[in-house]
Image (spheres, rainbow, N blue to C red):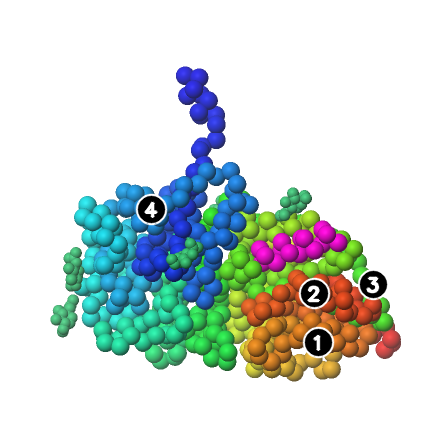
Amino acid sequence: MLLLLLSLLLPPTLSLTCIPLNTTTTPLSLHLLTQFCVGHLNSLTPNSFYTLGSNGVQFPTSETNDQFWLDVLHPEYPVTLKSPVDFIINDCFPSINNFIEYDFDTQREFEPILVTLCVSLNALPVSVNSDVKIMEALEGMRMVKNVTYEWENKSNLGIVEEVFEEYKEGFVKGEVVKIDPGYRWDGGKTPLIYHLTKDMDYSIVDFAVQNRLFTFFLANGCVPLTADHRVEEKIFRHFKKGSSTTAVYGYDDSVPLFGGDTYEAETNCVREHDIGQVASTAVDNVNFYNTSGQIENLEPNPIPVVEYDPEKTYVAFIVGDGDNFWHLKNNHMKLFNERQTLCLDDPESCFPMSWSIAPAAAKYMSDIIRYYDGIAKNTTKDYFVLPPSGSLYSYPGLFPSDVQDDYINTMDKDMKVYNTRVSVHWEWFYNWRHAISTYFTKWSEFATSPRGFVLANVPYLLPVWIFRGKEYRMVGDNVVLFKPNEWRYSSQKQSHTTEEMADILNGFEKGYITPVYMTIDGSLEPIQATHDLVTKYLDDHVEIVTAESLVDLVIEKEATAQAVKK
Ligand SMILES: *[C@@H]1O[C@H](CO)[C@@H](O)[C@H](O)[C@H]1NC(C)=O
Ligand SMILES: *[C@@H]1O[C@H](CO)[C@@H](O)[C@H](O)[C@H]1NC(C)=O
Ligand SMILES: *[C@@H]1O[C@H](CO)[C@@H](O)[C@H](O)[C@H]1NC(C)=O
Ligand SMILES: *[C@@H]1O[C@H](CO)[C@@H](O)[C@H](O)[C@H]1NC(C)=O
Ligand SMILES: *[C@@H]1O[C@H](CO)[C@@H](O)[C@H](O)[C@H]1NC(C)=O
């Protein structure tokens, strides 16, 4: 009796099964099945299964990084390691007795929509020619569909439409997952590769399954008048909630142009579908990182009061790419720790640093964001701002009017979560004037306190012609747009070494107020590089401030200029 009582009083036993996925040796079909099973089982018992490593193609997540988060966030979890095959046979099969047979070799293109069908029918996607042990274990299971046969003569488009019509009601609204299978089977003869270097990234499948998000892919969905467009239009119309933007998880890398993935932010569909992206390619275990629950409000470090001195130049560093879950989980981890070490080793030389962080991360990866907030509190000089372009990785200047209104409301709430007034903002080069006369004008009517937008142009090599000889532009009394000033290393142009960057910043006329937006997808190491810049190369008149302070400084500078005019 006493024992029983004791066992009732003790917290439930924590236990975690970890499944290492070696991206070189684990077959892709096994990857998909594993991610599916993890999502399914975690939806029954949250945080019980965790993968180590994810394929991610362009951006694999190493086992070490997954292990890092496990160790710092949940050192108390006793861990059992299991191979993917063991895990599937011993943990997953007993929980779902159904499977759908497909053929990985010829049907890879259908995998995104197959995930959706499997969620709908509570069945597992199992490819023919899977591991022998899996094939043997299938004997006791029920095949609910054989799509090797049923989809034999069908196109992806036809299947997406069919599955959507039949099962759409079973999925949540406001969000969808779009994963590029990187591959297309053309009538069983020629494989057409969407993107030569890529294959489907399954890392987000656990998340899609656990959160019941409609998952699909159509390559030409945004090209008007195509059949794909007609179907995609129907899908997005169904999943849209009121006048809100629909969040698309994934990363659209199907059109590689201009040295990047041109439509990676789902930009060629914005006007048609009112969508924005949560860049989430190659991130596994997302749901595992919000055991502490959604963040409502982070107390920031106090913002130092900086009084405008026309003899100085003011610079704020912003670490970029925080819109992207993969960077948040992998790169930011390395950078935040580097930053903490530098600041704690030498507090004298620790200057303010602003970090772009996706609002969706406060909702879905709150543990990781809280960890970074802990570092910010330790250095006392780190701050969070919204990434491009605000609530979602998007181009708000392209949104229709009602969607812009809704977006501003959402973004205002997101700014409160991170306690910031600043957002990085990018637009297509041709759209700035339109963005000012619609979106930023709406912001100026909406905002009762100052807001700052750090602009970046797409493509980034082109200049933005809206600044009339100044380093910023005001819209109304409260909205400050900052002229693009980016720092990236890469093999391409507009890459500056630390010395070159110092020359640029030292060379600005006195009184100049500017952000430096640092993208890290090149080889720039922003923490070490800014540290070198500040400690070795910048002149004394250059003062490093927070991105928040830039906004106040501009308003002060404007007021001074007005007073001089009078
Ligand atoms: C994955 O497998 C390859 C090939 O066997 C091996 O070289 C590599 O070390 C493995 N990676 C991990 C993280 O175990
Ligand atoms: C599924 O269909 C394929 C293609 O018609 C066939 O070769 C295979 O035997 C079928 N699988 C089962 C378990 O019936
Ligand atoms: C697919 O097409 C082939 C050739 O026309 C035909 O033999 C086969 O029965 C078709 N499969 C299905 C599932 O209709
Ligand atoms: C994790 O995020 C999702 C989405 O907001 C939420 O539904 C879920 O309750 C969160 N988990 C916790 C422990 O709060
Ligand atoms: C912040 O500093 C405290 C005290 O030194 C330390 O225990 C903690 O681990 C640090 N936080 C992070 C996230 O590293």
Label annotation for residue 87: 4
Label 3, label 4: how far apart the Cα atoms are:
61 Å
> Is label 1 in a helix, a strand or a loop?
helix
In-image side of 324 versus 116 (left or right): right
User: Which of marks 2 and 1 precedes in the sequence?
Assistant: 1
Report the amino acid beneath label 4: Phe
- Residue 278 located left or right of residue 413: left
Labelled disc at residue 307: 3
Instruction: Bin the neighbour count of mark 3 within 10 Å (Cα to Cα): few under 14, some 14-19, many 20 and up.
Output: few
**Residue for badge 2:** 530
Q: Residue 450 sits in which quadrant? A: bottom right
Amino acid type, callout 2: Thr
Q: Earlier in the sequence, mark 3 or mark 4?
A: 4
The residue beneath circle 1 is 500
Mark 4 residue element: helix
Q: Earlier in the sequence, mark 1 or mark 3?
A: 3
Residue 311 appears in the rendering? yes
- Which quadrant is the N terminus positioned in? top left
Q: Magenta region, mostly helix, strand or loop?
A: helix
Front in this rendered view, residue 126 or 158 = 126
* Label pair 2/4, CB-CB below 8 angstroms: no
**11 drawn magenta:** no
Circle 2: element type: helix
Residue depicted at 41% across the width and 21% down the height:
4
Residue range (magenta)? 332-346
